[in-house]
Amino acid sequence: MKTSLFSRIVIALTAFASLAMFAWPLLIESSGADESRVAQTVFIVLMPLLLVVVLVEFASGGLDSKQLALLGVLTALNAVIRILGAGTSGIETAFFLIIIGAFVFGSGFGFLLGSGSLLVSALLMGGVGPWLPFQMMAAGLIGLVAGLLPKPKSRWLELLALVAFAIVGAFVYGALMTLWNWPFLAGVGTDISYLPGASLGENLLRFFKYESLTGGLLWDTGRAITTSVLILLTAPALLATLKRAASRAGISRKAS
Amino acid sequence: MIEFVNLTFGYRGAESPVVSRANFKLAAGEFTLVCGPTGSGKSTLLKLFNGLAPHFTGGNLQGRIRFSGVDVTGRKPHELAELVGYVNQQPEGSFVADTVAEELAYGLEQLGATPAAMESKIQEYAELAGIAHLLEAPLSSLSGGQQQRVAIAAAMAAGQKILVLDEPTSALDPLAAEELVTLLARLSKQQGITVLLAEHRLERVLEYVDSVIVVNGDGSVVKSAPRDAFNNYRLLPPVVEFSKRVGIEPTALTINEAKLASVKPLAFTGLEASISGELAISVENLEVTYGKTEAIRGVSLKVHAGEVVALMGDNGSGKSSLLWAIQGSGQRTSGSVWSAKGDPAKLSVIERLGAVTLVPQRASDLLFLNTLAEELAESDRFNDVSPGETAKLFLQLSNRTDPKQHPRDLSAGQQLALVLAVQLVKGAPMVLLDEPTRGLDYEAKRHLARAIEKLKASGRSVLLASHDVEFVAQLADRIYLLEAGLVKTTGTASELLGFGGVLPTQVAQITEQPGLLLAEQVIAG
Amino acid sequence: MPVNPFRASALHPATWWFLGLALAAIASLSSDIAVELGVIAAAVFVMLTCREHAPWSRSVRFYLWIGAFVVSVRVLFRIIFNSSNPADAIAFSLVPIDLAGIHLLGDVTWQTLESAAADGLRLAAIVIAIGMANTLANPKRLLKSTPGALYEVATAMTVAINLAPQLIESLQRVRKARSLRGRSKGISALSSIVIPALEDTIEQSLGMAASMDARGFGRRGNLTTAQLATSRALSLGGILLISFATYFLLASNSQSLAIWLLVTGVLAIALTIRIASRRNLRTRFRRQKPGKKDTLVAAISLAAVILVVVL
């Protein structure tokens, strides 16, 4: 899919704004509890809109029937794997396919695959809540960046790049989602809650305490390990299959 | 109506074009059969009609295509959507919607029809295709034949005057296929729709078509009258083969024509049922129940060494369930299976491979590596045989192919040969084949028949499920006819597929001579 | 048996979402435990009486669990990371622990417990209200009502929802077939099961794509230069406004300005989507139109929200 320069600018701005909506507890200057509540509510309402903006911009380049069909297939597969893998705690199976799919089909496809996978699995098994747009945005951004990874010629380097990104991506996704549920679960007023109006450093420290004390880091490590292992196990076969599909569907990312 | 002028089309990177300088015209209401061996370019030719080639498939196009005098060369599929309806091989995979009515509406939605127009068109075409009573049904609840009718109605619902179908009968049983072809004939005769049908089971359609386009695979595309089409054609349907052998002039294309030629009683070689060796497998009172569905309701059968036994019966009569139950990994509710190495269900997975092997309906389900060579090598490793063993077996069953090819790019016949080789390398004396001729053309079927004969000669026994009467007549020593999970009748091929049998072959129907089933049996003279 | 006139499929899916979001808004605006409990009770009642048999209707319990989880985590957090005002009435006392500057446990006041429970219940009510909408609204019908600019994306999602059960079936079929070739189970067999199923589904989906194209998919109108320019200006402007608004929301003392910027930005984006949807030439078959019942439910929801705001 071709994304115009204009669309890219809009997407970049939207991504930037959405990051602020994840990280607002770190950034908020006003110290009133009401302001925090307003900000939280507004962002919950706004995030779906930002998602729509990005989706419209990616689709405006024209999603042809083959790309659409492949997007449907991979989204379905990812949702199915996620549903089958659910219940096994600490195992997060949604990411390896997003990363591999985005790597083969590019960043626009990656965003759609990332956000779509979480949407479809949530629709099918329940799991739609105020968190969903945030999860979709975060997973979409992971896909978007995975689509921008350099494409080395050597197979080993390719695998290395994927695994390295999987580890970083797992922690980034974890940090983003913890940032989101931090004010949601911890509220204000405890020693590990965010402190409205405090300095960035102070709040980062509190965030780190929250993340480690609530087991978030452990969870992220689990996600990083599962995703890397799944990539190592399936990437050789999946990459071949998807590259073949990409060339048949006429979607190709240039090798760098 | 349709005119191809000097049309040449080839895929990028291919050495020679698939279609080279094709020139032909099709009239309104003409019913044309497109035939040719697998991989010869039938599908590609059909895709040229609505722009899927080159716009969907990629490739280079030269020459002109005109519809009613208007040059439409180079138009995109969606620009031709009002003119050409297109139905591809697997309807169940190409549905976009949930229910029949929504599926029929899809094209109308894309073309911007008003809601009222949609309702009336949907009703009209559903009635035409005989699916009006199914409009609100979910697509997944339909039978294969019904699904194909839905696909046809959906392709025509916007009033398309040209209908292009790519092997629509390949997954249907003979009755459903027959019904589909008569529907197409009716559409062309009564509605004046130009129908192009690609099909490799020529015997199903020859009596209905007005003309035949032969795609040879070397780029030549020749249109002619049905009778002239087979003068230089390698793959002849049984009726044509027969009428050539006994010298009917002009060549008979249908059973009725051949009958009218009133052939005198012929000399023919008998079909010998092979002398049975030792008992290879014995099934006693097998029952299989899935939930409340009784798939198999007490079947007993025996297969001997060096014997080919066929299971016949309509889709849903229990053929597959029976094979899987015998192999041991399928469900069994009661009954017993005996083989020389014990009940396969009680053997370990590895031991079972040495006793009985099953090739499922979709052979490709067993293929997961990236090249043919990798698949062959993996099989050697896993089955613990010396390197190259599987490859040797594969070459016995198939012609030579590039080992670097992706298994999914092999033809259906080659995929089947590959899976057979992988499954047989452990040396199982008993081979179960589930609907092996599905999707194969005459050539590939001939290859498969030869492979089965080799297995038989080596003393292995083969139990195959099939509804391909001509293929079974060629190979089977004995036949079990299943109906609703029970053995309805059993006997030799001559008894069941010969004159007076339950499923007579075409030649049996023509000659009405007991014991004469196949054109090859006739002694010319 | 009488049929519930307000059963899930009798209303437009958007109506359920409207009701769900209205309940969520009420919960979010109030900080009264009784109101939150009322919202939860209403959502659960509607969920249980209106739902029908559909895969997405089976998760009532899931949402209740999440609700309970949120409340208990909030309360537990307040007890463990205690910061009660010592002047208030004490509910119970735990041995205080000092861990690297973080004060744990200690005297827990009623006031702390109450405010933690109220906060938790507010969030639980939001979760359950949105869960109610998801339980009752048919996602496929909802996807059909998306604006034209999102048609392709919505189609891909519908395809995915339709394919998911098929994929599970073909994964099971391949897994069964694998046993014929005698392979091991477990994680190392993953690609040998996923690959054939994926190859099959890709094959099928490309067939579907061809059949979509052949039936007219891909027809799009063109926007005039003026329309294109307007839409671009609006979307860029809208996103910039939202970015500024986000900044002002977080900066001190400028939230009212932020809200105005936001409203303008959101309007600009909505207009862009409208313009982009003009490229869509398709019509919709049996598009479900909101009826009297929908108006009724929407009116009641709106009235309830206004009531809460006024009071």
Image (cartoon, helix red, strand yellow):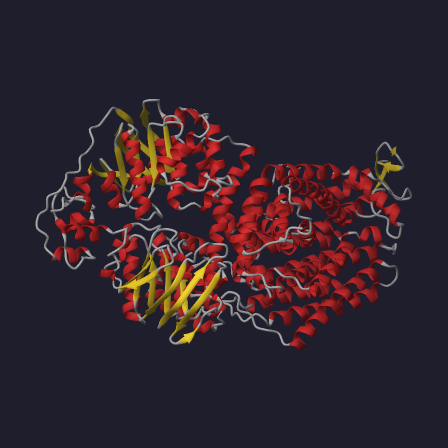
In this view of the protein, can residue C54 be seen by the observer? yes
Q: Residue furthest front?
A: B15
- Residue pushed farthest top? B341
In the rendered view, tell whether residue B269 sits above or below residue B154.
above
In this view, the residue farthest toward the left is B264
Task: Please identify the quarter of the rendering in which residue B130 is found.
Answer: bottom left
Quadrant location of the C terminus of chain C? bottom right
Residue B332 rendering spot, x and y as whole percentages? 37, 32
The quarter of the image holding the N terminus of chain C is bottom left
Q: Nearest the camera: C72 or B141?
A: B141
Query: Picture quarter containing residue B161?
Result: bottom left
Q: Position of residue A237 (x, y in %)?
A: 56, 41
Q: Nearer the viewer, residue C189 or B92?
A: C189
- Seen at 53% across and 34% down, the residue is C189
Question: In the rendering, at what x and y percent does residue B154 appear?
Answer: 41, 63
Judged left or right of residue C291, residue C91 is right
Query: Residue C237: x and y, percent?
Result: 75, 69
